[in-house]
Image (cartoon, rainbow, N blue to C red):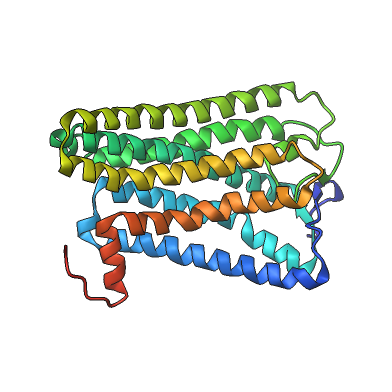
Amino acid sequence: MENISVSDILLLEDLDLSESSTYPVFFTLLFVYIALLISNIGVIFIIIAERSLHEPMYLLFCNLSVNDILGNTFLLPNLLFDMVYKNRLISYSACVTQVLGAHTYGSASHTILIIMAIDRYVAICNPLRYSAIMTAKAVVILSVCAWAVAVVLVGVLVSLSVRLSRCTSVIPNFYCDNASLFKLSCEDVSINNIYGLFYTVILLSSSMGTVAVTYIRIAITCWTKKNAELNSKAVQTCASHLVLYLIMLLTGFIIVIMHRFPEYPFLRRLVAILFHVVPAHLNPIIYGIQTKQLRLKILQMFGRKITPS
């Protein structure tokens, strides 16, 4: 850090861990990080290696696993390093990179689940046209759009914070986020707050609206057709997606709520970590258990003899 000026060094909020709890927490988080890497990389490998899983639903799910890996990699390794070496310093450029990673993770979680909801809608409501609509090209375009929208929204968000001059070097959080970044400035941050509100409203309204509309249409289709096979397929493929979305939404809302209670800093830090690690762990587990084809492939890899039902 010799080539970095003093003004480019930021001080992160202390985790306030006691000596006796530092290493138990460290090894717990290390285990959690390794486990989520193994589970998500494993799911991606299985989907890519098995030609029978080269379907839009599974290929779209790979986007979610990639996002979970990247999102947690921007947070946990740095946090683990700081816990061991008691170093709460971070360069400004590294802080900006962490902000980009953290917010892209949250935004991409919404945009990816949006395209997965659209995929489920087409599969249930237009099954005869599904293969014609959800082609390989369509999956690639939807995936690129999901990531592009997330990156553009976050890029503008962070650019508005980076343009500001800094009058302090203390980050009021244990990791870098956009709110902490623009709070380093003593300038007027009204534009940041306005765009931040716009960004949040656009992201949440589009994801919640898309999920609500597609699932209402799916429910109506299942109700009117009264087809047992169709209903079973809808429950099997849609339940996992809906559970993933609700988990992501719940953890996100809890973080927002905890920011309103500064008198509970430990809970705020805990919830922020859980927002990253809980969905990343549950995504492959829920999809692996709920989706029959993927579940069978996972069990086969562990050497179990599967008898198709």
Residue closer to the observer: 85 or 124 = 124
Q: Where is residue 126 in the image (x, y as percent from the top left)?
A: 19, 32
Residue closer to the observer: 230 or 132 = 230
Q: Is residue 72 found left or right of 268 in the rendered image?
A: left
Residue closer to the observer: 68 or 17 = 17
User: At 74% from the left edge and 65% from the top edge, which residue is drawn?
Assistant: 83
Q: Is residue 170 found left or right of 195 in the rendered image?
A: right
- Residue 175 in view of the camera: no
Q: Where is residue 173 in the image (x, y as percent from the top left)?
A: 76, 47
User: At 30% from the left edge and 62% from the top edge, which residue is drawn?
Assistant: 295
Q: In which quarter of the image is the N terminus?
A: bottom right
Instruction: Give the residue at the far left of this rendering.
Output: 128
Residue closer to the observer: 226 or 113 = 226
Q: Is residue 136 found left or right of 207 in the rendered image?
A: left
Q: Where is residue 273 in the image (x, y as percent from the top left)?
A: 64, 53
* Up-down relation of residue 151 to residue 70 (above or below): above
Instruction: Give the residue at the far bottom of this rendering.
Output: 303
Q: In which quarter of the image is the C terminus?
A: bottom left
Q: Position of residue 166 (x, y in %)?
A: 82, 36
- Residue 79 in view of the camera: yes
User: At 82% from the left edge and 44% from the top edge, which residue is drawn?
Assistant: 263
